[in-house]
Each structure stands twice: as C-alpha cells, then as structure tokens.
Amino acid sequence: MLQDIRENAQGTIAKIIIGLLIVSLSIWGMDAIVGGFSGEPEVATVNGEEITEREFLQVVQMESQRRLSEMESPDPALLDEDQIRKEVLDSLIQEQVLIQDANEQGLALTESDVDALITQMPQFQVDGQFNRDRFVASVRNLGMGVGEFRNAMQKQYVVNQIRGGIMQSGLVADENAAQLLRIQNQTRDFRSVQIPETAVADELEVTEADIEAFYEENSAAFQQPEQVDAAYIVLSLDSLAEKVEVTQSELEAYYQQRADDLAREERRASHILVENSADSGDTIATIEERLNAGESFEDLAKEFSVDTVSAKEGGDLGYAGRGVYDEAFEEALFSLDEGEVSEPVQTSFGVHLIRLDEVRRSDVPPLEDLEQQLRKELAREQAQEKYAEVRAQLADSAYAADDLAGPAKEMGLEVREMAGITKDGGEAPFDHAGLIRQLFSEDVLEAGYNTELIDVGNNVSVVARVREHHEARQLALENVQNDIRRSLEARKTRELLAERAQAVIAGLEDGKTLEELNAGDWQQFEDQARNTRVADPQVVQTAFSLSRPSGSKPSYGFAMTPSGVSVIALDAVNDGNVEDRSEELRQLREFMASLDGQREYAAYQQFLRNRAEIARP
C-alpha cells in the first residue's frame, strides 16, 4: 500500500484526497470529524457504533455554512433547517456503514502510510518540500485537529478504495455502445399533415351541466388559498442615497479620484478558437509551432479557427474594454503586451490563442458630462455606512415594537401595505422565501409579532407584520365558471382532434388518400435527426417514437400541437453510422461504463444499509 501511495500522491491522490475527503467531510461530516467522545448524547447508532450529538450538530453547522456560501445573497432565513438535519443524519449513517464495511474487509492505512501520504501532498509543501506549518494551518482552517485529520484520512481513504473499485468495475460491451450510438445518430423520413382546431369547432359543446359537474368533482381545486394582508417597512441603500447631499467640492475630489478609471482602456484583439475535444491540445500545438516558424496569425486563424466570423478577418475581434469577454479570456488579454500571443486559454467556447494588436485609451470626459452619474455613485458610497447603522437600529426597534408605526416614524420610513399574500409568495418584496416563511410562522401569524428584519435583496431589507389573516375558502361557482368553461373547451377540443386524427389514420391504413379524407396535404421531412428544428417538436418526438415501417407500409401516429393535431406517417428509419465515429464511440462506452459503476456502487451502499442495525433514539 505504501508503494501505491508514493506512486499516486502527486497525481490522483493529491487531487482527490483533499477534494473527496476534506470536502466530503466539510459537507457531510463523518465519524472522523469528531470521533471517540464516549458518554456523549447520541443521535443514532449503526451496528452499535454511536453517532454523537456533538458530531451531528457540528456537521449540521458546516453544511448550513456551505449552503449559505453558495447563495448569491446569503440569507439564513432561506435555509430549511429540518431538511438539512435530516440529510446530514442520513449521510452520517451511510458513511458509518461504509467505514464499518472497510474495517470488516481489513482495509486500513498504517501510521507510516498516513505520514507518507501527507508529506507527499503538494497542498502541504513549500518549494517542493513538506512544510509542517502549512499542514497544521490547513487542517485548522478546516476546523479540525491534526489527530482528527489523520484519523479521517485513515477511514476515508479505505472507503474511497471501495468506492473506486466498485465504480471502476462497470463494463459495457462494445456492441451495446455501438447500438446506442446508432440509435442516437439515427435519422428518419416522415410526413405530417396538420388538422387545425377549427376543423372540430362545429362539434364543440360545453353545457352548464358539464360546468356544474366538473365543479363538484373537482371542488378541492377551486379554493382560495390561505392569505394574509401585510404591513411592511422597506429600508434600502438607494432610498438613503437619495437623501445624501453631495457638495461641489466633494464631487470634484471624487472626479479626480476616479480619473484613471474614467479614462477607459480598450484593447484590439485577434484570436484563434479551437473546439474542446480530445485533439484540441495537438491542434493548438500545431498552430503554435507554425506561428513560431513564421507563419502569419491571420492565415492560421482562417485555417483553424472555428469562430468563422472573426476567422474571415484573420481572427480580428476589434476593440473592447473590460467586462465584454469571458473572465479567463479578459484576464489573458489584459496581461499581454502589444503584438504578444497568449498561452492557450480555456473558456466555455473552447481553447483560444489570443494576440493583442493595439491598445487605446480615451480621454477623461469633462466633469459636467459625468456630474449626474458621479453624484449618484458618491451618494451611494456615503450612504453605505449610514445604511448599516440604520439597518441595525431598525432591526432592534422593530423587534421590540408591537406595531410598525413607531419604528417607521423613528427611522423616517413609510409603512406600506400589500394584500392577498399566499404561502407561495406575492409581488416584491413578498417574493422572498425567507420573508414568506416568517410571515406565516406561528409567532407572526398567531402571536402578532413583527418579522425579523429580512435582507430581500442587495442592500434592501424588509420588516413586516400581519394585518389580517384569511383562511382558505371555497370559491363560488359563479366566480370560476368561465375558467372551467375554457378548461373544458380545451379538453374537449383535444378529444375531438384525437378522434379526427385516429379516423384519418384508419382511412390511410385502409388505402385512402388525404384528398379522399379531406385532410389537407402532406409536408415531407427527409433524413431528419432527433434534434431537428424544421418541424414542431411534438411532431418530431412522435416520429421518433413510432415503430419501424413494415416494408413499404408506413407507420402512423399523431401529436397534439399548439394549433391543432398533426397526423404523422413514418416512411423510413436510417440507422446512424458508427464506423467513422471511433472517438465518439469510445466516449460513449466510457460514459455508459461510468453509469454502470455508479449504479453498482449505489446498490452496494443500499445492501450494506439494509443489513445494518440502525437505531435512532
């Protein structure tokens, strides 16, 4: 095992252990995070092994922090704490089952194995040598002690061995992958004829009795949901900024401070774009070699670039400032000197070679041209500190008050009202899930308290209270009968269209023509792929769901479309070619094998869990 560690520490281990182990620990926790605290309260046992309350709560906190970090505007009110606790406990149980299985199989790292693994990880090295200070600091940043980290590595490493062994065992026969590729690249020849809704309009009839019967049978669908009418106060940075008076001297000083930023720099770039593929590295290397040999960037752009528009101009993209290109592209472009060609730059579009052709800088516009813009910017800057101060005051005042009038008067703010807010939300600011959750909470809805001050946007905060609560109630028939009529008409129209389509298909199968069936004219579609856009998506989906034609006899079907129904005749199925798609076949085979391995690992986890004795006090 030690030799295996030495061979892999610089590659797979270095990339995966910190990713899979530490991130897995920080997300889901495990027995390794806080292990061995005997006598502590427990939240579950797995085959007699305890999961302690301390361990559980620590992981819940870590998972909550992780989810907050993923929010654009972190708001604890948006977290579903019950769901987090449930998911964390389930994961802790699953991980304990896996650890016990690894122990039963005798998989373990010795202390010297752990030492070798840690000392060879680049994350803990300085100038290529293991650095204990960096190691200790990194571990502490995870909220762990060195002993806990070592224990976690011992346990998680062997669990990952089991995971990797099972997931890499997925096998897919070459012919299975080839058959799937043939189906995936299959094309079809088909015809369709559209029957419009107007063709059945004369047969459509919805009576009052139909409406009443539908209302009675679906009474639960015609309820006005529980609602509240709310009073609320909005505090925003913009509203505070409007009250800030910026003096002329402050404006002039700010103008001078912003002078460098206001002198906009634009860069003229050319690029050669190569698609992401297994061969992209070789293609880029060929281009760089020919550039170094003296061939022109423009000629190579015309030959290789998949950006056909700029390729015609030798790769020229024209002038652009910051904030226009992809972040990686922009960073590379603005680090170049004139005439310099970048190293390969990876973006979502592919791999770029970028050349900086020219730099130009505009003069700073006169103050009078920018006065309005700069006044707003400076007012917002000055209001920022005030906003934090007023926000804290409003939070305290609203928490202690039994209404909103007092806090609003104290802060110089307006009390607003909104009616008809449901648990699904309403218009802004009641489109914020955290604010809605508090508004319908027991303390606010029944006890009559104000909500907490909730940040509903960037520098926008709201506190609200319930003015009036409306229980869910049944809507009267006269209030919904028009909606029911429209619904029934739409349903009956679809039924009539389906009957008409089936009648046309029956006639076609009996050898009749569309002219004899008074059904319009065929529209022909030859050699169409699954993702074609030349026909309605529902028509294409139906065409690819029909069985292969038998001899010269088409297969028929129909599909509802936004304007009626289409009858489809499938004439031929053309299998996709796999002989000249070796790379695509290889990728598909690997993907299918990966899916098979994932299914096997999921089944193995479930097997272990089913046979484990799990108790939750």
Image: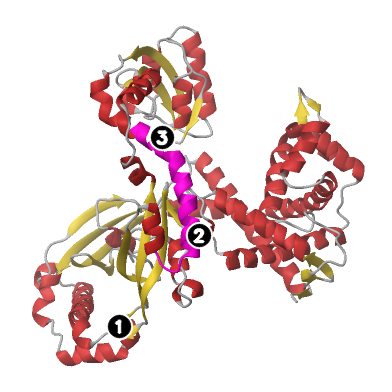
Residue 511: numbered disc: none
Q: Give, as a three-letter code, the residue at label 1.
A: Phe
Foreground pick, 175 / 477: 477
Q: Let me know if residue 381 appears in the view.
A: yes
Label 2 vs 3, first from the N-terminus: 2
Where disc 2 sits, the SS reads helix
Q: Is residue 91 left or right of residue 279?
A: right
Distance from disc 1 to disc 2, alpha carbons, whole Å, reads: 30 Å
Q: Give, as a three-letter code, the residue at label 2.
A: Leu
- Residue at image x 79%, y 49%? 157
Tag 2: Cα neighbours inside 10 Å, few (<14), some, or many (≥20)? some
Q: Which residues are magenta?
A: 377-404
Residue 381: numbered disc: 3
Residue 78: numbered disc: 2
Distance from disc 1 to disc 3, alpha carbons, whole Å, reads: 51 Å
- Residue at image x 41%, y 35%? 382
Q: Quadrant of residue 316?
A: top left
Which residue is the site of mark 1? 222
Q: Is residue 207 left or right of residue 441?
A: left
Label 1 vs 2, first from the N-terminus: 2
- Establish if 75 lies above or below 385: below
Q: Is residue 134 left or right of residue 214?
A: right
Residue 293 x %, y % = 49, 8
The mark lying in front, picked from 1 and 2, is 2
Residue 608 x %, y % = 75, 68
Q: Residue 389 lies in magenta, yes or no? A: yes
Q: Residue 402 lies in magenta, yes or no? A: yes
Q: Let me know if residue 458 appears in the view.
A: no
Q: State the quadrant of the N terminus.
A: top right
Where disc 3 sits, the SS reads helix
